[in-house]
Each structure stands twice: as structure tokens, then as C-alpha cells.
Amino acid sequence: MTVTQPDTLPATTTHHENTVAIVGGTGALGLGLATRWAHSGVNVRIGSRRAEAAQGCADKLPGAVGGDNTTMIEGAAAVVVAVPFSAHVETMRSIAKAIQPGQLVIDTTAPLLPAGPRGLRPIVPWAGSAAEQAQALLPDGTSVVSALQTVSAATLQDIELRLDEDVLLCGDHTADKVLAADLIDRIPGLRTVDCGLLDMSGVCERITALLIGINRRYKTHAGIRLTGLPEPLAR
């Protein structure tokens, strides 16, 4: 991942390395990410509003644990938010007190609403994007980056399927993006690409509606691949 517009602000985490907590981990995307990370040796914590549902999902994955969202967040090196946009504000408010200073939050939310029988349309949240909305609702000092909106949940859940796509990553601080990229790149077949500051997240989030439409039309689970980039991408 080549980091654009770098800054000098360091990550100030004192959390358990190699541990990721997934808020909304029993949903399609959350469970898919949990599956891939667990099989890649990452310590996965599956969070849910219902602790028993989270534990039931965790029991099916190597080394994973489950519980309520706030308990799973405590001490995790990274917190991945994998909830639908309709639950985004409520979720941010419910976990705000559990988020610790300097803790990395990776927001995967795509602001979409139903449009027609099977379509989805992108909307613009009051903060400009879901990730910026998360930044506004979480405590000062929370490190928010945006990523993973364009990766198919169904593809992630099927561990036998080979991934080969890029993950669009936005964030305001270099150290946060590097930490997020290191975690995401643990999943074989995913490559993170730095797309700039957090205010670019809205552009990346809205691509999701286009991609869903393409996949429905062609009955597939295509992802995003950017061509012409140098290999390997620098951190």
C-alpha cells in the first residue's frame, strides 16, 4: 500500500497485537471477515448485540471467541464495524464508551437504501460518508479508517474460493492506514490501496451500489482491481 499525503501522527495503541474485534460479526460481511482472518491466524473476537449468537458463530472458527460488542472491543488492536447503514448511528453510540484512546476502528459500512424491487441506491450521510459519521460519533482520539465495502460477503465466507481483488482504504493518519493494511493483507488475495484521506471515503462507499448492481446483473461476486500499480505496493 502506497500511503498518499502522509502525516507524522503516530498510532498510540497499547492493545493486544494480532487481535481484531468485529462489531456486527454475526452478519454476512462480519462473519466472512471473521472466517478469513481466523483461518489466517488472526485472533478473532466476534461481537454482536446477542452474546450467545456471537459465541455460536465463534465456535465454528479456529481460535475465535464471541460475546457482546462492548466486551469484544476491550483491548483489541483493531475494531471492525460491519453493520448495515440503518444500524450505523445506533451502533456507534452503543460502542462509544468501550472504544479506548488510540484504538483503530475500521468502518466497512456502505450507506445504501433500497431502490426498486431489488436495487440499492447510495445516499450521502450528514457527515459526508459513513466513516466520517463514525469519526464524529466516536470519542475524540479514535482512529477511524474506511475499507472493505466492495468485498463480497459471500466470497469471504466460502474459504475454498480464491480472492483476487483490491481493498480501497481511506484515513487521515499514515500509521492508522498502515496498521489497517497490515491486518487486511493477512487475508490471502486481498491487496489494500491507499485512496487518500477520510473525506474520500464517500467516493469509495458509493462504488458499492454500482458493484452490487453489476454482480446481480451478471450473477457473480466480482470485486475491484486497479491496474497499472507498482508491485509490491510500498507501505
Image (tube, rainbow, N blue to C red):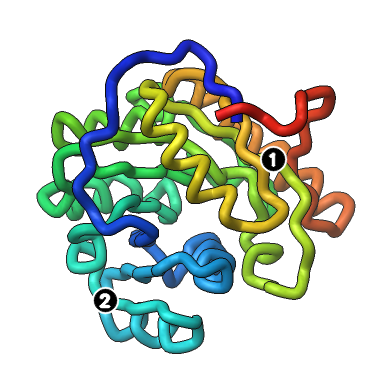
Which mark's residue is nearer the viewer, 2 or 1?
A: 1
Horizontal and vertical percent for residue 30?
48, 63
What residue is shown at x 71% (from left), y 37% (from top)? Answer: 210
Q: Earlier in the sequence, mark 2 or mark 1?
A: 2
State how far apart marks 2 and 1 are (Cα): 30 Å
Q: Secondary structure at mark 2?
A: strand
What residue is shown at x 66% (from left), y 42% (from top)? Answer: 191
Rendering quarter of residue 163:
bottom right
Asked if residue 202 is positioned above or below residue 25 in the image, the reply reads above
Provide the residue designation for mark 1: 166
Q: How many marks on residues?
A: 2
- Kindly identify which numbered label has been placed on residue 232: none
Asked if residue 74 is positioned above or below residue 183 in the image, the reply reads below
**Quarter of the rendering occupied by the C terminus:** top right
Residue type at tag 2: Gly
Q: Nearer the viewer, residue 20 or 113?
A: 20
Can you see residue 41?
A: yes
Horizontal and vertical percent for residue 170?
49, 28
Horizontal and vertical percent for residue 133?
32, 32
What residue is shown at x 62% (from left), y 31% (from top)? Answer: 193
Horizontal and vertical percent for residue 61?
50, 82
Residue type at tag 1: Asp
Q: Disc 2, disc 1: CB below 8 Å?
A: no
Provide the residue designation for mark 2: 67
**Quarter of the rendering occupied by the N terminus:** top right
Q: Secondary structure at mark 1?
A: strand
What residue is shown at x 35% (from left), y 61% (from top)? Answer: 19
Q: Residue 230 vs residue 55: left or right?
A: right
Rendering quarter of residue 9:
top left
